[in-house]
Amino acid sequence: MNFEHLFSDIHLKNVSLNNRFVVAPMTRISAFDNGHANEKMRRYYERFAKGGFSTIITEGIYTDEKHSQGYYNQPGLANDEQMKTWEPVVETVHQEGAHLIAQLMHAGGQSQGNAYTDETVAPSENAPKGEQLGFYGGSGPFQTPKKMTEEDIKQAKESFVQSARRAKNAGFDGVELHGANGYLLDQFLTDYLNDREDQYGGSVENRLRLFVEVIQDVREAVGEEFMIGIRMSQIKVSDPEHKWAKGEDEAEYIFSTLGKTTLDYIHVTDGDGAAPSFGTDSRTLAQAAKDFSGLPVIANGKLGDPVKAEKVLEDKQADLVSLGTSALANPDLPNKAKLGQDLNEFDFESTLLPQADIKDHELQMELVK
């Protein structure tokens, strides 16, 4: 196959991309203890750029020196020193002809490792389901978080603003707000995690309010020309089977509301990005985001097979595809697809166990150019 859709040009905001392949954000807990990006991370992101991906979205980057950090050895953009350590990473990716987007993440009640505090915060005093992830350094159930005050919410919003400013100053091509997978913004949207009775709780309109406010505040801080996206999901790290209570109707409200903001794209992730997300014969999550928001959409979830990914684009369910584990196994996947070469299978044990840090063998893989 020539994969004409996957290898077609597209513009996101004021950025021109030469293909539709995106590296999905993946937590790799390889930063220094102080949240500084380092040489191993620079080489890790460099490989995806050399391998033909037009765009790379970083792992979730924490936003403040309070409650946002989710994992030990997670990188930050919480201060200017952390910002400066990202500059060589950005420069390297740009030198290889790719673009780099910083994903900004506040872990909220799903935090399982924070160098600044032992306390977690969330919309309500409801712990996430399930247990912490061992390959990210956690163990046992999540702790019960402190219910955020209005001042806490204001501080969290400001942390997104300041980290977005730092991302722009570091040279990133844009920021992606992490509103998925059970982290703080998603906790506000999730009915069983948010039982607030103020303007941030109750109706889906209220539970989505923080998303809208953060988008607005970040846009005011970075200006009209800087790219802002958001990641959305029904599923969570701690609850992979979760669905929005009112299904496609709720999706329509959520995505249409986001479409009225100043966002430049929506990035959705699902168990299978090409499968119905709201029951038999329903839309995929990507199709719902595209239909209801009118914005460019990045689809994620088991789309590492280029034939499958091409079909998603051909059917106009999404505009780009982001790849996670298949990109780890094949940091040169776009180049391999162009040449019709076979892909490596992802090896969970050798890549993510005992810890999901960047392994030496990943950096030593020979790339197809």
Image (spheres, rainbow, N blue to C red):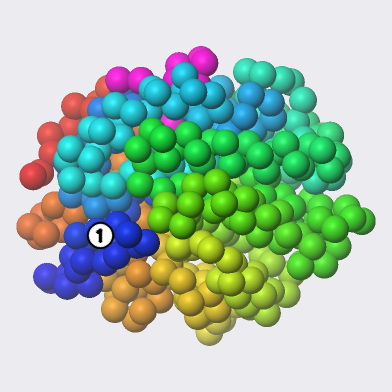
Instruction: Identify the residue at horizontal 48%, vertical 43% (top origin).
Output: 103
**Residue type beneath disc 1:** Ser
Q: Residue furthest top?
A: 33
Please give left or right for residue 97 compared with residue 33 in the image: left
Dot 1: what SS? Answer: strand
Is residue 320 in the magenta section? no
Above or below for 327 versus 202 = above
Which residues are drawn in magenta? 28-39
Give the overall secondary structure of the magenta segment.
loop
Whether residue 308 is visible here, answered yes or no, is no
Above or below for 296 versus 270 = below
- State which quadrant residue 277 falls in: bottom right
Q: In the image shown, does 270 or 81 lie closer to the viewer?
A: 81
Could you classify mark 1 by the number of other residues whose Cα lies within 10 Å: few (under 14), some (14-19), or many (20 or more)?
few
Question: Disc count in the image?
Answer: 1
- State which quadrant residue 332 falls in: top left
Please give left or right for residue 218 compared with residue 294 in the image: right
Identify the residue position indicated by label 1 in the image: 16
